[in-house]
Image: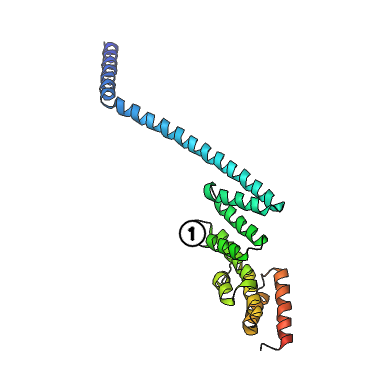
């Protein structure tokens, strides 16, 4: 009798669970289906977006390499056009890389003013990586040594000279050379001495700085 009662109770419980499921499904089944569809569509969309990004990045990379080849072959105008096109519709970091390389091509063509303006544009682009912006400032500063004033060089390079900035000694060298060109020997000496005093300065940069310090000392124009 107890066994029959247990069997009866199990059947009742199963029936109740079945009825509860039917009721729940009738109330929430459409929502469950909707959620499942949203998950499937979102997953498919994300995978599609990943593929689209990867495909476009690959295309931009190929275009960037092709433009580099044109530049290395001395086809400056064609390379410049290719880089400028990539600036407009490239993906990822390629537009900024293309802008940097286009500035270098302008410099190679002898258009120093255009190159400086292009590097300054990259330096002012807050969407670009900080390291790339700093390199652009340094490139502009070095171009301005021959064509600009000390103040113009300083506006680009001095911000890079402090602390443990990776480009500090190259920036100091640019400032020292610009000051030397302006015959401000005291200031030039300060910048070159800062390089020599920096134990981490690259050996070639330190050697050039020491040569400039010797020249300044021989000139007798700085204490």
Q: Sort mark 1 into few (<14), some (14-19) or many (20+) by Cα contacts within 10 Å.
A: few
Quarter of the image with the N terminus in it: top left
Quarter of the image with the C terminus in it: bottom right
Residue 31 appears in which quarter of the rendering?
top left
Residue 63 appears in which quarter of the rendering?
top right
Give how far across and how far down residue 131 sits, in percent: 57, 60
Q: Can residue 110 be seen in this view?
A: yes
Q: Please give the name of the residue rendered at 49% of the width and 56% of the height, measured from the top-left corner.
A: 127
Q: Which of 153 and 57 is in front in this view?
A: 153
Q: Is residue 134 visible?
A: no
Q: Please give the name of the residue rendered at 64% of the width and 70% of the height, measured from the top-left corner.
A: 169
Q: Please give the name of the residue rendered at 46% of the width and 32% of the height, measured from the top-left corner.
A: 44
Q: Which of 38 and 5 is in front in this view?
A: 38
Q: Which of 79 and 56 is in front in this view?
A: 79
Above or below, 140 against 50 in this view is: below
Tell me the SS state at disc 1. loop
Q: Mark 1 points at which residue?
A: 126
Give how far across and how far down residue 110 sits, in percent: 66, 63
Give how far across and how far down residue 180 sits, in percent: 66, 79
Q: What is the basis of the colouring in this image?
A: rainbow
Q: Which of 182 and 10 is in front in this view?
A: 182
Q: Please give the name of the residue rendered at 73% of the width and 82% of the height, measured from the top-left corner.
A: 215
């Amino acid at each position: 009798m107890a066994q029959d009662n247990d069997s009866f109770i199990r059947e009742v419980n199963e029936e109740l669970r079945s009825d509860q499921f039917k009721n729940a499904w009738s109330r929430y089944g459409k929502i469950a289906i909707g959620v499942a569809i949203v998950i499937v569509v979102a997953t498919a969309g994300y995978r599609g977006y990943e593929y689209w990004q990867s495909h476009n990045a690959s295309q931009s990379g190929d275009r960037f390499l092709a433009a580099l080849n044109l530049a290395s072959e001395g086809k400056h105008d064609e390379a410049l056009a290719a880089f400028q096109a990539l600036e407009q519709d490239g993906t990822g970091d390629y537009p900024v890389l293309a802008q940097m390389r286009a500035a270098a091509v302008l410099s190679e063509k002898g258009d120093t003013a255009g190159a400086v303006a292009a590097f300054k544009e990259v330096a002012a682009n807050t969407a670009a990586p900080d390291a790339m912006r700093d390199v652009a400032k340094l490139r502009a500063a070095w171009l301005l040594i021959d064509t600009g004033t000390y103040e113009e060089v300083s506006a680009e390079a001095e911000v890079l000279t402090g602390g443990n900035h990776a480009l500090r000694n190259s920036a100091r060298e640019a400032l020292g050379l610009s000051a030397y060109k302006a015959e401000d020997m005291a200031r030039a000496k300060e910048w070159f001495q800062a390089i020599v005093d920096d134990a981490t300065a690259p050996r070639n940069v330190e050697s050039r700085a020491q040569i400039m310090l010797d020249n300044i000392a021989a000139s007798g124009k700085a204490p």
